[in-house]
Image (tube, rainbow, N blue to C red):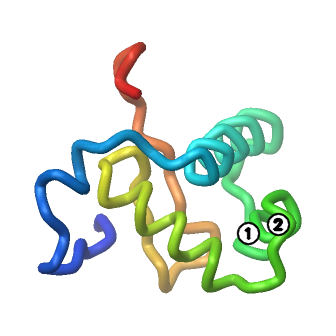
Amino acid sequence: MRCAVPSWVTPASVTRPPTPQQYRLLRFLRAYASTNGRPPTQREMCRHMRVASMNAVRAHLLGLAKRGLIEWQPDVARGVRVVRRPEGAF
């Protein structure tokens, strides 16, 4: 099950490349999963991004999900999965 994308999301926001913070989080997700065999927790993502608020991480996850770069189940522990994209996708 993929994260539900809000109705206010426009096609332009979906096709834009990720922000630098989103790209940093995406690289962390890929590296963590390849090293540990599972995705990080949201607290681990907060520590990596050096933010205190899990809402900031959730906003980045939603942005990545809107762009189709990850599949995210907000109500599932470690419910993040990086979707493989062709080289040069962003």
Q: In this view, does 24 lie to the left or right of 13?
A: right
Q: Residue 41 carries which label?
A: 1
Image quadrant where residue 4 sits: bottom left
- Residue kind at label 1, given as amino acid type: Thr
Q: Which mark is residue 44?
A: 2
x and y percentages locating residue 53 in the rendered image: 74, 85
The secondary element bearing badge 1 is classed as loop
Q: Nearer the viewer, residue 89 or 29?
A: 89
Answer above or below: position of 21 versus 35. below
The residue lying at 60 percent from left, 45 percent from top is: 20
**Gap in angstroms between the C-alphas marked 2 and 1:** 5 Å
x and y percentages locating residue 84 in the rendered image: 41, 31
Neighbours of disc 2 within 10 Å: few (<14), some (14-19), many (20+)? some
The residue lying at 51 percent from left, 49 percent from top is: 19
Neighbours of disc 1 within 10 Å: few (<14), some (14-19), many (20+)? few
- Residue kind at label 2, given as amino acid type: Glu
Q: Do the residues labelled 2 and 1 touch (CB within 8 Å)?
A: yes
Answer above or below: position of 82 versus 6. above
x and y percentages locating residue 18 in the rendered image: 45, 45
The secondary element bearing badge 2 is classed as helix
Q: Is residue 34 left or right of residue 11?
A: right
Answer above or below: position of 14 versus 6. above
The residue lying at 31 percent from left, 48 percent from top is: 68
x and y percentages locating residue 40 in the rendered image: 73, 60
The residue lying at 40 percent from left, 28 percent from top is: 90
